[in-house]
Structure formats: structure tokens, C-alpha cells
Amino acid sequence: MEITVTENERRKRAIDKPYHPETGEGSTIGRRVCFHLPDAPIPIQYLPEKMLEEVELVKLLRRYGSIEKFILHELKEQPSALIREEVWRRWIKVRIKYDFEFWAILFVRIKNKTGDTDIPFRLNRPQRRLLSVLEDMRTSHQPIRLILLKARQWGGSTLVQMYMAWIQLVHRKNWNSVICAHLKDAAANIKGMYSKLLDNYPAWLIDADKPLSFRPYERMANTSIIAETGCKVTIGSAETPESVRGADAVMAHLSEVAFWPHTRLKSPESLIRSVCGSIALLPDSVVVLESTANGTGNYFHQECERAKRGESDKRFLFIPWYEIEIYSLPVDDYDALIASLTDYEKTLWDKGATLEAIAWYRMKRKEYRDHADMMAEYPSDDVEAFNHTGERIFDIRQVQKLRESCRPADKIGEVYGKSAAGKQALNGLQFKEEAGGKLQVWALPDSDISVKDRYIVVVDIGGRSSKADYSVIVVYDRYWMMFGGVPEVVAQWRGHIDHDLLAWKSAQIAEFYHQALLVIESNTLETEHTDGEHTEYILDTLADSYTHLYARASAEMIRSQAPSRWGFHMNRSTKTMVVNHQIQMLRESGYIERDIQACYEHDVFERKPNGSFGAMDGHHDDILITRCIGNYICYTEPLPHQITTVRKKLPGSVPIGEASI
């Protein structure tokens, strides 16, 4: 997009557009209608359309055209100051049900970030965007479910908490909520905003005869109640999850989820299930997960990605830094700034930033030695937000591009033979769909076209127990490489299994995919001698029955004429080689990924302080290792070639078309 002062002025006018929540002018939350009531404290108001359609008081005042005429003709009273005040209060009670912004500016006070005094809660632009999403769900009578990826300092957590308070004070009684943050003090601070609200809240709004306040509930230290509404608020933290388990809540504000600890005994997933599992799918029920980012591959990152793909029950929202009003500096010479813009700064313009915002970014950037750190603190999109400070191996945007081809498997099941091990394991092979199967299938073997060396199967060996690394078997289809295309992941098995059975399982899958080249990462089998398995002989035994097994020959073997050894051996040298090749694959879109979990493992793969490669602590890289080895083999083995065209289609096969060479 061309960078011009004219376009910049247009953007600034949009930002500076008048916004007066008292009157409703400038609100973008739903359709609004101008309403004139000349003798009201606010004579001209822009009201939510539904308020005019649904509320009898509004219809009557609109008919009479003034409060005085309404009192005279409808109430049959003389319009005294007391009666006028009572009508106005009834009006306010009605409007606050339809207009959160009006309620917030009149009755909510928050801390002024630039001063010591409290100020009325006037929503900024990012808060109005967030409110729009929440209100879209509420007014359409949907359960409110949102995951919010935050940039810094715009009050997303404040808006979420005040919105939940609005539901409890204006719309519902006996409507309980939970506030859970990464630290208990953080949760207490969020509740403190609610306490400040109650300190200034007029009792007449809920027909109470005394000021509102939180009171201890049943001697529970972490639960308070507003007696006049019957609404309870429970606070807790990820450090002490037992404090919020079993809370009778229909609303949950879960804050800084990306920083919740993941240990052997507790995880963000289990805590969120315990808090939210009992929240019914009702209108006005609320579950909001909000956080700044904290690296990739963790629970919060994965939930954001699920929401973006439409696989979650939650909507996804991200606010970039340049939409936050405070991040702006005056520009004295527009032409000089435009002429000096870097390529990255030009992308900020293309995304919608003003030149004033870019000027601020350029000045702020000087505080950071590494631009990646700046992007993580002040992200312009959700990809930048998830940059982590470790030395990640794979470019975050290239991993994001890899996600574009991922999708759920078409079928899930297992490949079975006449037995689980031994030569009979490779006879009578068939794929059976079953809910508990560990084999995900995106494409069954194609039997319409006979292509030699079309499929490659790669195996990474994990542990036997459920807490160990996974074993992974991946199937590549190299058909399109014959025409200049790229290989594609078409099936994957992942689970825990004894190593001898894993070897036979991988041979079954390789045989099923037309005697695919079977590449087994052999380190574990060559170094492990436990449980009487004689693991050093597993591949030799397998080779007697499965003839298309990958073998390697080192330079020393060739010179000494020693026999090749089965499997792919991963050492420091070969790991560096295949990882560098995988970097190239992502850069050049060298293969088609299907499994979204593979993308997460790319995200958390890093270079350790000692120079080695591996997943970040608490994460896996077993799927990634199969991709590193598999892509290397796909491009170093001879290309597949068609040997004949077969007209007969076998049951269960998936054709991809015919070709002749």
C-alpha cells in the first residue's frame, strides 16, 4: 500500500473520531438510533436499537417527546423534581441493561495509569473491540467463550472483569464467578477492581437500602458474596488450584494462562477442566482465557491456534500494539520519515499503523538489543506475539505457513495382520477404523497406479510407559516428486509400545503402503539391552521378513567392506545435517504437513546452551525427528517412478488419478 500523508490523516481521523459513552455517540457496539429527550439530563442520546424496540418506557417517552409530558399524561402527576428524578433513574436502570459503555462511564471507576486519582471507566479502542466480541455473543444468546491474546497496557483484563461484574450487578442474580490467575496476588488485584466498583456503586441501581460490598461467604477465605444479589466471587491461582476446584460458577476469568505452571502433578489443562467443566452452556455464562504470550508450544499457544482454526468452543481475539492509543509520537517531518522507513516498518504501515505509531515504535526499538524481543513485547500480529527468547531453530512465520495444510485425519484406526509379530504379522494386512486407534490416516495407499519407491515410512523410537517419549511412525507419499512436486505426510502412528512390537507395527504399516522403504531411527535399539528383549537383534530379525528396510553404510564400513547396518543412526553430526535440511524444507515449502502437533514441535525446538538440539523443557520432539529424517530421506533416495497403470481399484484405496510416463 502506498505510504502517503493523506492516507495517514485518514487513519488518524478514524482514531480520533468522537466517542462519548454518556450519550452513546461514536459507539460501534451494535446499531444505534438517535433519541431526543429535550428535558432529560442528557437531551440527545444514541441508544441501542433493541432498547427502543423492546422497552415500554422508551416507547412511551418517544411518543410523548419529553419527560414532562410523560409524567403529565402517563403518570397523571404534576412534574415535580422528585418525580423527574424517579423517571430519570428508571431510564438509567433500563439503559444500563442494554449499554455497557454507558454503565461503565457512569458507575465504574478505575485507577488512572498516568496519575494517582481514580477516573471514570471510559473504554479505549482495544477495549471497545473486545466488548464488541463479547456483546456479539451475549446479544445472540450464545454462551460467551473467548481466548484473548494480549499486548501490553491496554486494559484487557480490566474490561473482562468489569463485564462479568456488569452481568452480576445488572443482568443476573445468584450468578457466581471465578477469578484465577497465575499468581494469587494477581487474582486478588483483579478482584480489587471489583471491590473498588462496589465502593462507588449506587445502592438504588439494584433497589438496595444500603451500600454494596463483598462479605466473606461461609468462612471461606477465597470466596466472597454480594448479599444483595446472591452472587459469589471465588479467587484462586494456578499455584493453589485446589482453591477453585468445585466452585459453583457460571463465569470464569482465567488470567495470564500462558504463565500457569506445568508439572507432573498439575497442568493448565487439568486446572481449566476442573474450573470450567461444570460451567453450563447457558446465555450469559462466561469463560475467558486471557494472557500475554509466553513462548510457543504451551497450552495457551495451542488453544489460541485451535481457536483461530475454528476447532475450539472459544473465539480468538488479538489486539496489535499500534491500535493502542498511547503508543504514538508526533511527527515533525513526514517526508523524511517515509523516506527512511525500513522494510519491517513498511509492513507495519501495510497492517494499518499510522506514521505516528511507527515513529513511536522506532524510538522504543532502541531499548532492545534484539528485535525479536521487541516484537514479543509489542507484537503487531499474533505470530510475533509468540516469539520466545530461546534460540529457536525454525522461523516462526514459516512454521505458521506449515500449519496452513494441516487438518484432522480422514480416518483413525490400526493396520492389522494375522499376528502382532513375526512373519505372519505381514500377512492378511488390512486397515480397520476404530475410535481408539493410534494411526491417523489422511490418505490410504493408492492402488490405481503402480509406482516404485513411492512411499517412505520413518520411525522414531520412544519409551514404553505413558510418561516416556512417544514412538512415532510417519508415512510419506512421494508421488508428486516425479513431476517436480513435494512429498506429503499421509499417515502417522503415535503411542507407547514395546520396542519389538513397534518394529513389527512399523513393518505392517510399511507393507500396507506398498512395501514402503522402512527407515527406523536405530539409536535406542543399538544402545538398549534391557528386559530380556535382545533389542540389538530386533532389526536383524525384522530384516528376515521385511526386505525393504533402510540400511546405512559409513565411510569406514565401505573402506573395510563391513556389512551395512540397519536403520538411521542419529548422532551429533547426522542430527545437525537433518535439522539443517528441515530448515531448508520450511523455507522452501519442501513438503506438505498434515499433523498440527508437528507444527507445535517445530515451535519448541531450540538450540541448547551446549550447542545441542532439542525440545524446550516439558515438550516433545518425537514427531519433529521423524520429519527431519523423513524429509532428508525423501530427497536423498532415488525418485519414485511409475512402472504400470492398474485399472482395478482395491477395496479401501484412495485414488489420486492416473498418469503415464
Image (cartoon, helix red, strand yellow):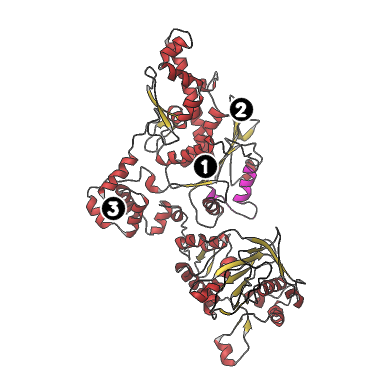
Which residue carries the number 1 mark?
A: 186
- Three-letter amino acid code of the residue under disc 3: Ile
- Three-letter amino acid code of the residue under disc 2: Gly
Q: Residues within 10 Å of mark 1 (few under 14, many from 20)?
A: some
Q: Residues within 10 Å of mark 3 (few under 14, many from 20)?
A: some
- Three-letter amino acid code of the residue under disc 1: Ala
How far from the left and from the top, in percent, is residue 463? 67, 67
Which residue carries the number 3 mark?
A: 3
Contact between marks 3 and 2 (CB within 8 A): the answer is: no
Between disc 1 and disc 3, whose residue precedes? 3
How far from the left and from the top, in percent, is residue 585? 48, 70
Q: Is residue 270 magenta?
A: yes
Would residue 337 be found to the left or right of residue 654 on screen?
A: left
- Calculate the distance from the C-alpha at mark 1 to the C-alpha at mark 3: 42 Å
Q: Residue at x 62, y 78 (%)?
A: 567
Q: Which residues are magenta?
A: 255-277
Q: Residue at x 63, y 88 (%)?
A: 563
Between disc 2 and disc 1, whose residue precedes? 1
How far from the left and from the top, in percent, is residue 398? 46, 63
Contact between marks 2 and 1 (CB within 8 A): the answer is: no
Which residue carries the number 2 mark?
A: 230
**Above or below 235: residue 405:** below
Local secondary structure at mark 2: loop
Is any atom of residue 308 visible in this view?
Answer: yes
Q: Residue at x 41, y 58 (%)?
A: 372
